[in-house]
Amino acid sequence: MLEGQLLRAVADALSDPIFVIDDGGRYVDVIGGKDRDDYDSGRYLIGRTLHEVLPQAKADRFLGWIRATLTRGEATHYEFSLSATECDGNRREGPHGEQWFETRIAPLKDLPAGMAPCVAWTVFNITRHKALQQQLRYMAASDALTGLANRHAFDELLPRMQAEHRRQGRPLTLALIDLDHFKSVNDRYGHPTGDAALRRFAELLRTYLRAGDVPIRLGGEEFAVLLPATEPCAAMTTLARLQALLREQPFPIGAGATLTLAFSAGVVDAAGLPDSDAAYRAADALLYQAKRAGRDCIVGGDA
């Protein structure tokens, strides 16, 4: 008896909870889960079923995992998200908002005679780990100076969006943009001013493009924009408006001085080209034409 009490005391002191759940989805017992930074108290669940506590779709999924584990006769592992607001009867003593969990579900052996088959469902809160993963993904895909998507993101997005738009029979405009005479900005005013100008241009792209458009900094003063479901002629009209805004809104650089930015662009329908390399080469050739035409110029069409 003393040994059983000791085991229970140790189990209840565990930071991470273990739910004993039968093959009908009923909570038989809840052990551990003392860490209120990561978990709500689960004692209110005992005697209730998954479907009494959770939204039906989530309860169905969890019950499927339990039955699959019992059928296999060995432990299984899953990830899922859950918030306190999804759990009927939750006192909300723990963390707020959506939480991510990793779970290990193991079939219980040697149960008392007449007891329904059960699993031990152990959960580990991995929300902070997920947030770190998301931050690292953002950093890997984002330009540190401007916050726009970077070249790595461009190389992943363009072929995927090309395939999607080609399948749907819709245009996908790719615009390659290069700020005109930008080397002279750095040479005359210094790199801090040049960096501020790049951030200013990036903010202009974010502000005036549509929500679904994707502005990207490829490196240096070279940018790209992906415009979904947009014909090149419509994209050229949008870019021309951006050129006009730059002319109308000089960039202040201190001591009453201003800097007027300008850009050239090459515009193609990427969905109509064989692959991402072909689309980039075509847009780059048109950008070169725009530079040769006197800069502050947009050229579209087939290269």
Image (cartoon, rainbow, N blue to C red):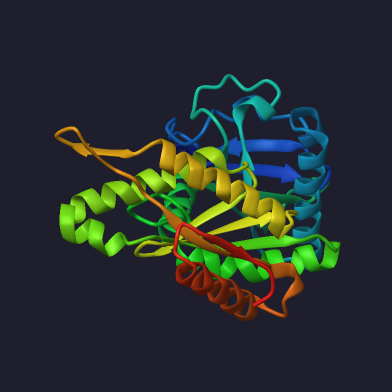
**Nearest the eye: 250 or 96:** 250
Name the residue at 52% across, 63% down: 153
Total marks shown come to: 0
**Nearest the eye: 162 or 128:** 162
Left or right, 296 with respect to 50, comes to left
Left or right, 212 with respect to 59, comes to left
Name the residue at 37% across, 49% down: 261
Above or below, 56 against 107 in this view is above
**Nearest the eye: 16 or 29:** 16
| Rendering quarter of residue 258 | top left
Q: Position of residue 185 (x, y in %)?
A: 24, 56
Is residue 67 in view from this perspective? yes
Q: Position of residue 241 (x, y in %)?
A: 56, 43
Q: Position of residue 106 (x, y in %)?
A: 66, 58
Q: Quadrant of the C terminus?
A: bottom right
**Nearest the eye: 145 or 20:** 145
Is residue 3 in view from this perspective? no
Left or right, 216 with respect to 210, comes to left
Name the residue at 72% across, 76% down: 273
Above or below, 61 against 291 in this view is above
Name the residue at 65% across, 71% down: 159
Left or right, 56 with respect to 86, comes to right
| Rendering quarter of residue 50 | top right
Q: Which residue is the extreme one toward the front?
A: 294
Q: Position of residue 24 (x, y in %)?
A: 84, 43
